[in-house]
Structures are given as structure tokens and as C-alpha cells.
Image: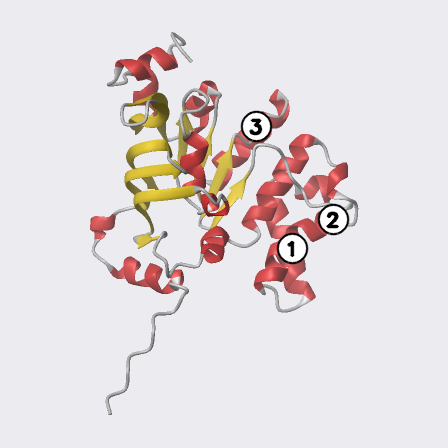
């Protein structure tokens, strides 16, 4: 009797796919995310309509646009955070390193390990500074012994430009740090599990200008190790730090008579801000609306 083939694993095994992709021809280039005809729904409401663009390795990609235009919704698609919303539905193609991350065999937990997220408001755990950074490596089994964990914690805090400020306070509560320090701690916590991508949802909106400058400098430093996608309402910030910019706006969806997010233009940042191809982009970046 012929033996039946084993069923596909519920985990896609992104590392295996990554190896296959790395051996493929250079046609893939340096694409990290390839998005094509992305539509996102919350129930019957379409929040984002037909977005298509590519995010490239070791670049900072900014998403700008007025409130309610779908920027954060798209960002949350990149690591399947929208899965946590019962009414959310994602249609279209969204590949991460040539792997379709919405394939039912893909483990969303693995996706979120590989694609970390830093939120608008710093959200350190009510634990010590050390335990905040050690949490992910402990859960994922990255550290086999205490010295390994110590190395990961120190390395992550150094990468987040925070080690010199907290190395003698590791047992103190992370909630005692300043807002800017807390946000850098959250960045350190995200990179402690060695992701490929960092998603940042308005990471500086709650910070003062000095703390904002520290975070921006940090992003420029670590983009050599990570690909960064940032949502920001601060157009000056997008112009300062990003390599490419996507401009979204909200327009009336003729099929539902509701306003949905639309990607108007995506290009190199200097082009978006100095010579955009769409009048709507020019009106937004010059302050005529928004």
C-alpha cells in the first residue's frame, strides 16, 4: 500500500523559505516586502484600497498622510497584527522575503518575532529594565544560559543607545525611565529577539524634541542592521530620516459611500517632497491640505 504524503506543517518554516529565496536569481533584488492590490476590511468597511508598493532592505520607509487614511492599518498588516481584530480581513498579496505571510500555514507568532513593532506610546512591561529586554529571548529559548542572556540584554541596550544610561540600574523598574528612555527600551526589547524588520507606529509623537532627535539618530544608526517602516504625521521627520515615502489619503469609496485609505504616491523621499508626480501629494507636503 502506498504511503500517504505527510500533511504540510502548520508552520511554514520561514527560515527555510528564506534560504531558498537567498539562492534564487537576483530578480528578487533587495525587496523585503512586496505589496500588491492590498485591501483591508473591518467587517463591510474597506479601510485600505488596492495598495501596491515594495519595501527595500536596510532602508527607512515612511508612510505619511492625514488621519484616517489607513497608514497604521497597512503597517499592522506587515506583521499580522490585524489578525487580533475579529472583524479584520486582508486581501491581495503581501510577501515577506518572497514568502506570502497570509498563507494559512504561516505561524503569525513567528512572523511577529521576525517583524518587530514599536508603538506610538512607550509600553514597557511593569518589570525591571533587565527583565523587559530578557523577556523575548527567554520565551523563544534564544539564551541557553544566564551569560548568554546577559550578552543579549547588553547588546540590545547598546544598539538602542541606552546601555550607558541604565547599566547600573538594571534591577530598577522600567516604568521609572523617562519617556524617551522608555521608547528606546521598547526598541531594545524589539531587537532582542533578532528581527529582520522594525515597524514603528508614530514612535516620537509622545516625545519632546530632544528625545525625538535621539530616536531619529538611533533609526539612522540601526538601519544597517534592520529594515525600518515608520508611520509618522511629522512630514519633517519623514523628510529627515526616510529613504522612501508613501503618501496615503482618504477618498470616497464609490461602492460603499465611505471614505477609505488610498496610496496616492510612493517614491524616493526627495522626489516626494521636491518633485511629486501627483497634485494631491504636492498639496499635502506643501501644507495646502491635511
> Residue at point 62% right, 25% down?
207
Q: Looking at the image, tell me whether mark 2 or mark 1 is earlier in sequence order.
A: 2
Give the structural element (helix, strand or loop) at label 1. Answer: helix
118 left or right of 236 in image: right
Residue 257 at x, y percent in the picture: 33, 22
Q: Quadrant of residue 8?
A: bottom left
Q: Looking at the image, tell me whether mark 3 or mark 1 is earlier in sequence order.
A: 1
Residue 191 at x, y percent in the picture: 54, 48
Marking on residue 156: none
Residue 277 at x, y percent in the picture: 24, 18
Q: CA distance from mark 3 to mark 2?
A: 23 Å
Q: Would residue 119 be seen by someone viewing this image from the given angle?
A: yes
Query: Circle 1 is placed at which residue position?
Result: 135
Pointers 2 and 1 in contact (C-beta within 8 Å): yes
Query: Circle 2 is placed at which residue position?
Result: 127
Give the structural element (helix, strand or loop) at label 2. Answer: loop
Q: CA distance from mark 2 to mark 1?
A: 10 Å
> Residue at point 36% right, 65% down?
16
Q: Looking at the image, tell me whether mark 3 or mark 2 is earlier in sequence order.
A: 2
> Residue at point 30% right, 34% down?
51
Query: Circle 3 is placed at which residue position?
Result: 204
Pointers 3 and 2 in contact (C-beta within 8 Å): no
19 left or right of 196 in image: left
Q: CA distance from mark 3 to mark 1?
A: 24 Å
Amino acid at each position: 500500500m502506498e504511503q500517504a504524503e505527510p500533511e504540510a506543517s502548520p508552520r511554514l518554516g520561514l527560515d527555510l523559505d528564506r534560504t531558498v529565496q537567498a539562492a534564487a536569481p537576483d530578480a528578487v533584488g533587495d525587496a523585503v516586502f512586496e505589496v500588491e492590490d492590498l485591501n483591508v476590511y473591518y467587517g463591510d468597511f474597506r479601510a485600505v484600497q488596492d495598495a501596491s508598493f515594495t519595501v527595500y532592505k536596510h532602508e527607512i520607509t515612511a508612510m505619511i498622510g492625514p488621519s484616517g487614511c489607513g497608514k497604521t492599518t497597512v503597517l499592522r498588516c506587515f506583521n499580522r497584527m490585524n489578525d487580533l481584530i475579529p472583524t479584520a480581513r486582508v486581501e491581495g498579496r503581501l510577501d515577506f522575503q518572497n514568502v506570502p505571510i497570509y498563507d494559512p500555514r504561516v505561524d503569525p507568532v513567528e512572523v511577529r518575532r521576525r517583524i518587530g513593532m514599536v508603538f506610538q506610546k512607550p509600553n514597557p512591561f511593569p518589570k525591571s529594565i533587565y527583565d523587559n529586554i530578557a523577556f523575548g529571548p527567554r520565551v523563544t529559548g534564544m539564551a541557553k544560559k544566564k551569560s548568554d542572556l546577559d550578552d543579549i540584554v547588553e547588546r540590545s541596550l547598546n544598539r538602542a543607545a541606552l546601555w550607558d544610561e541604565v547599566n547600573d540600574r538594571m534591577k530598577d523598574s522600567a516604568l521609572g525611565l523617562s519617556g524617551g528612555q522608555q521608547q528606546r527600551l521598547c526598541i531594545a526589547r524589539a531587537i532582542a529577539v533578532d528581527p529582520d524588520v522594525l515597524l514603528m507606529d508614530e514612535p516620537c509623537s509622545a516625545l519632546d524634541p530632544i528625545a525625538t532627535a535621539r530616536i531619529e539618530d538611533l533609526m539612522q544608526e540601526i538601519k544597517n542592521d534592520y529594515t525600518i517602516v515608520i508611520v509618522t504625521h511629522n512630514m519633517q521627520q519623514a523628510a529627515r530620516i526616510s529613504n522612501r515615502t508613501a503618501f496615503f489619503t482618504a477618498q470616497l469609496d464609490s461602492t460603499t459611500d465611505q471614505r477609505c485609505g488610498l496610496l496616492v504616491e510612493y517614491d524616493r523621499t526627495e522626489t516626494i517632497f521636491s518633485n511629486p508626480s501627483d497634485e494631491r501629494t504636492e498639496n499635502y507636503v506643501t501644507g495646502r491640505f491635511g
